[in-house]
Amino acid sequence: MDNPWLDLPLADYEGHMALPGIEQAQMLSDLLADAIAQFEPQSIAILGCAGGNGFDRIPESVARVVGVDISPRYIAEVEVRYQDRFKKLELIVGDIQKTEIGFAPVDLIFAGLVLEYVESDKVIARMRSWLNTCGHMVTVLQLPSTTCSQVSSSPYSSLQSLANIMNLVPLHALQHRAEANSLVQLESRTLDSAGGKTFQVQIFSPSQMHAPTYSE
Ligand SMILES: C[S@@+](CC[C@H](N)C(=O)[O-])C[C@H]1O[C@@H](n2cnc3c(N)ncnc32)[C@H](O)[C@@H]1O
């Protein structure tokens, strides 16, 4: 089965995420900006970057920006929008679950609402290898709701194609998997969106107890 993200027009996705009452685009962009202000990274990777939501919040002085997405059309749009903004913009089309997709370690990984679309256990193990020893990984997960559907209804009916492949990730499972990969959870907080959904923001950093030792 083809991944429905490959057929979903970016305009539909962005229109849906920006709708009053959904407003998840603004929420994710704000969370990225907060993480940048908190950790002042010199290199940043956005996993599942879509059309570059939040890239306008990354200071131009950041030395290296990596954007990864499974959709070649989304990545092409990120290139059009941001190729002149950063000193080094690495754009990667591919499935973050696949071993051939990867990049040199960065100071900050931001994974906002993407782990719901992958085998999260597999990807978290890979995320550690994409993180510098003193780096930080910020994840945003959607939490279960008894009142909201997983994919919100909106005039963009094409978004409903995602309902079949979206799987909420239990936040304790994420924490356990991260810890199994030598990542320590530094923060975990709940965030209510304007649209009535609830999200969990978790911040991890490599455990210094497991830091590799180098001999000269
Ligand atoms: C809900 S959106 C993420 C939101 C995005 N970070 C934002 O701020 O708008 C999920 C994104 O992950 C991408 N994606 C889904 N599965 C993927 C995979 N296996 N590998 C890489 N990207 C994937 C989709 O194409 C989509 O752009």
Image (spheres, rainbow, N blue to C red):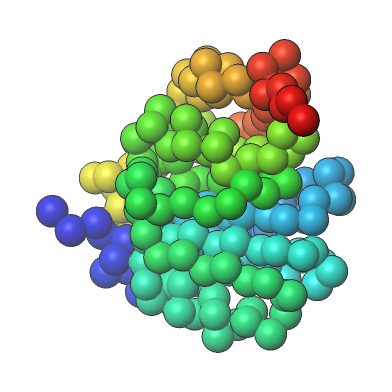
Point 55% across, 37% down: residue: 129
Pick out the residue farthest to the front: 216
Q: In which quarter of the image is residue 55?
A: bottom right
Q: In this view, does 14 lie above or below 176?
A: below
Question: 201 left or right of 102?
Answer: right
| Rendering coords of residue 196 (x, y %) | 57, 42
Pick out the residue farthest to the left: 1
Point 68% across, 55% down: residue: 44
| Rendering coords of residue 61 (x, y %) | 84, 69
Can residue 149 be seen in the rendering of this structure? no
Q: Is residue 212 above or below residue 56?
A: above
Point 53% across, 53% down: residue: 103
Point 79% across, 56% down: residue: 42
Question: 31 left or right of 72?
Answer: right
Which sits in the foreground, 91 or 110? 91
Which sits in the foreground, 205 or 190? 205
Which sits in the foreground, 152 or 102? 102
Question: 135 left or right of 5?
Answer: right
